[in-house]
Amino acid sequence: MDFQYEFVLSTLPQLMQGVKLTIHITVYGLLGGMALGVLTGLILAYRIPVINYAGAIYVWIVRGTPIVVQAMFVYFALPLAMGIRMTGVYAAILVLAINAGAYIAEIVRGAVLSINKGYVDAGLALGLSRFQVTRYIVGPLAFRRMIPPLGNQFIIGLKDTSLFIVIGVGELTRQGQEIMASSFRALEVWTAVAIIYLVLTTVLALSLRWLERRMKII
């Protein structure tokens, strides 16, 4: 079977539509995941009464179930239970935020607990409140340690968007499947899709590596 480069070029406009949606879901999903993960991670790190248990249960449930099952539950089961309607894109963003948030929470918790207690005691001795110590001392130090694992989680999140094909979201993998179904050019289609994912993940990895080097300088 000959590889048809012309066919690959002809599919790029449709694949780029999938890329746009993939980036859209990734950006908004990971932003939500960061907010949820940082909040939950701090709750777990400081063992805030009562809600600490809620945070631990949330992390346990999400980390113990596949993201595909989570997507199916949010898109099909949750609307029935709550009597609401939800688009596939909204469901994908919500699932990615919830899923990434659980893993980011563990990253945040580990980074915060890794900071020497002497820094905290010194800040408190200077008259800073615990919130100020977290914001000005623990936070910046922990953030530097979080960059590598956060980078890995962001890349995982980007690749996980391909799994939302199960709820009919027209991201990159879905577009590839539709092109392949109508053309039967599996070799060209999936080669193109794989290369596009490699480009996206490489750009993200290099950006995070640059940020990591810059934070070390600062």
Image (cartoon, rainbow, N blue to C red):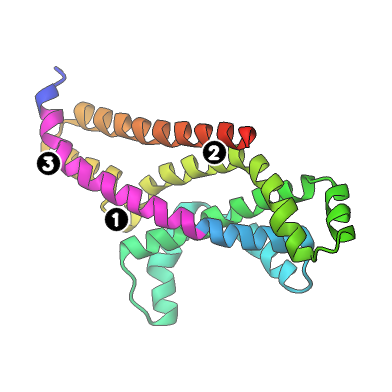
Classify mark 2: helix, strand or loop: helix
Among the two numbered marks 2 and 1 on one chain, the one whose residue lies closer to the N terminus: 2
Q: From the viewer's perspective, is 45 left or right of 180? A: right
10 Å crowding of disc 3: few (<14), some (14-19), many (20+): few
* Residue at x-position 44% and y-position 63%: 94
10 Å crowding of disc 2: few (<14), some (14-19), many (20+): some
Q: Nearer the viewer, residue 119 or 107?
A: 119
| Residue 153 placement: quadrant | top right
Classify mark 1: helix, strand or loop: loop
Q: From the viewer's perspective, is 97 left or right of 139? A: left
Among the two numbered marks 3 and 1 on one chain, the one whose residue lies closer to the N terminus: 1
Q: Could you say which disc has been placed on residue 169 in the image?
A: 1
Q: Quadrant of the N terminus?
A: top left
Mark 2 and mark 1: span between their CA atoms? 24 Å
Q: Is residue 202 magenta?
A: no
Tell me residue 203's x, y (percent).
40, 33
Q: Nearer the viewer, residue 167 or 25?
A: 25
Q: Quadrant of the C terminus?
A: top right
Mark 2 and mark 3: span between their CA atoms? 35 Å
- Tag 2 near tag 3, CB within 8 Å: no
Q: Amino acid at mark 1?
A: Val
Among the two numbered marks 2 and 3 on one chain, the one whose residue lies closer to the N terminus: 2
Is 195 rendered above or below residue 33? Answer: above
Q: Could you say which disc has been placed on residue 182 in the image?
A: 3
Mark 3 and mark 1: span between their CA atoms? 18 Å
Classify mark 3: helix, strand or loop: helix
Say which residue label 2 marks.
152
Residues in magenta, as a range:
7-32
| Residue 79 placement: quadrant | bottom left
* Residue at x-position 74% and y-position 52%: 137
Tell me residue 72's x, y (percent).
41, 61
